[in-house]
Image (cartoon, rainbow, N blue to C red):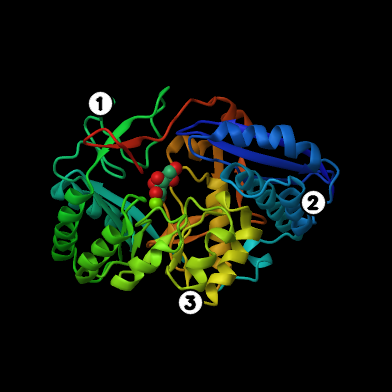
Amino acid sequence: MKIQSAEVIVTSPDRNFVTLKLTTDDGLTGLGDATLNGRELSVVSYLRDHVVPLLIGRDAHQIEDTWQFLYRSAYWRRGPVTMAAIAAVDVALWDLKAKAAGMPLYQLLGGASRTGLLAYGHASGKDIPELFDSVRSHLEQGYQAIRIQTGVPGLKAIYGVASNATAAGNTGKRYDHEPAQRAPLPAEEDWDTRAYLRHLPGVFEAVRNEFGADIPLLHDGHHRMTPIQAAKLGKSLEPYDLFWLEDCTPAENQAALRLVRQHTTTPLAIGEVFNTVWDYQGLITEQLIDYVRSAVTHTGGISALRKILDFAAQYQIKSGMHGPTDISPVGMAAAMHLGLAIHNFGIQEYMKHGALTDSVFQQSFTFTDGMLHPGDQPGLGVSLDVDEAGKYPYQTAYLPYNRLHDGTVHDW
Ligand code: GCO
Ligand code: MG
């Protein structure tokens, strides 16, 4: 089974997606997600200019060898662009191998370890009544675990929450699950950590009072706190029994998490911006986190994330794979197959893609009573309609960014 052609497909149905499509000499096709939100075209170039020429004629069955060849022969290690490109190749090869075997991919990864994957959705509101409506609508859709994000009094627009006006002058509602604004420049949001730390415990108290003690609740701090602020937040949220507090600090300084961990029993999830096992080394061996947040798409693919998760398993750390809408349906399918197969699955983030995205990508997964399943078609169970994809050309789209009240740029 030799790779005959490799095509990089860019489409923007509801937002930008980059997909690698490999075709073999026996006519099979395999797909891999290479979407890096806000920096999509860098991965397109990395693939088209540097990787595709290396793939033609290679044995599509040699997944590990191809991974090692792409990682080591580039000489320059790691980084989101490189690892997204390698991930796309790796996932497309797994898709091909599973199709050649006539099996759903999870069977090749060891078979199902469970019947379905607990998923969490994103509830948000600028105030408590709007947040409650959003939680109710998630419950009606079957979600059994919910992430809670709200506005903070005094702040006009913050990550994860609806907003009627942003500092950049954009008007109209914007939720983080909508595409990053398709604008020539990033939209500006504002931030005040003290106001946030004062406000958030009351929000969780209100949600627990309204919806009860049972439902798993999550929260994303989106890298905005210092270690001591994160410790304080984790401690103040303990009465509300969070499933996890995510990205409480910018965790490239892994040692900083020791301080957070000393102060709180709120479970911690980190890693959506990481791309190799080295970003986790201290976090895992010192048991400073409870969940690995990496996506297959941004961590070098199924082969590499599987190794990270197997390493984490030895320390009772579970998966919590990143699954916002900027992970394409191909990347989501890869996450579901991996999540079904591993023993240390924790939870899967799942935000529904828009209707246009679903018209470009045909998918076999199911979402029933809050549980995901990748389906039983051979391979990943996703196909891409190239004609439909061609109707939606790439559009410039930046992620927003943050400034403090005095104008200082802050982590978004
Ligand atoms: C999450 C993430 C996303 C990111 C987005 C950036 O937990 O789902 O934080 O909302 O902000 O994926 O591209
Ligand atoms: Mg996050």
How far apart marks 2 and 3 lie (CA) works out to: 34 Å
Which three-letter amino acid code belongs to the residue tagged 2?
A: Ala
Location of residue 217 by image quarter: bottom left
Q: Secondary structure at mark 3?
A: loop
Residue picked out by circle 2: 60
Q: Secondary structure at mark 2?
A: loop
Q: Please say whether residue 360 is visible from this viewpoint.
A: yes
Say which residue appears at 47% left-offset and 72% top-offset: 317
Q: Please say whether residue 352 is visible from this viewpoint.
A: no
Residue picked out by circle 3: 316
Q: Where does residue 327 sit, x and y in percent of width and height?
A: 50, 46
Q: Earlier in the sequence, mark 2 or mark 1?
A: 2
Q: Is residue 361 left or right of residue 162?
A: right
Closest to the camera, between mark 2 and mark 3, is 3
Q: Is residue 256 left or right of residue 296?
A: left
How far apart marks 2 and 1 lie (CA) works out to: 48 Å
Location of residue 251 by image quarter: bottom left
Residue picked out by circle 1: 171
Q: Earlier in the sequence, mark 1 or mark 3?
A: 1
Q: Nearer the viewer, residue 233 or 2?
A: 233
Q: Is residue 91 left or right of residue 200?
A: right
Q: Where does residue 135 sit, x and y in percent of width and height?
A: 24, 54
Say which residue appears at 75% left-offset and 38% top-offset: 52
Q: Earlier in the sequence, mark 2 or mark 3?
A: 2
Q: Secondary structure at mark 1?
A: loop
Q: Are marks 1 and 3 in contact (CB under 8 Å)?
A: no
Q: Where does residue 190 sit, x and y in percent of width and height?
A: 25, 37
Which three-letter amino acid code belongs to the residue tagged 3?
A: Gln
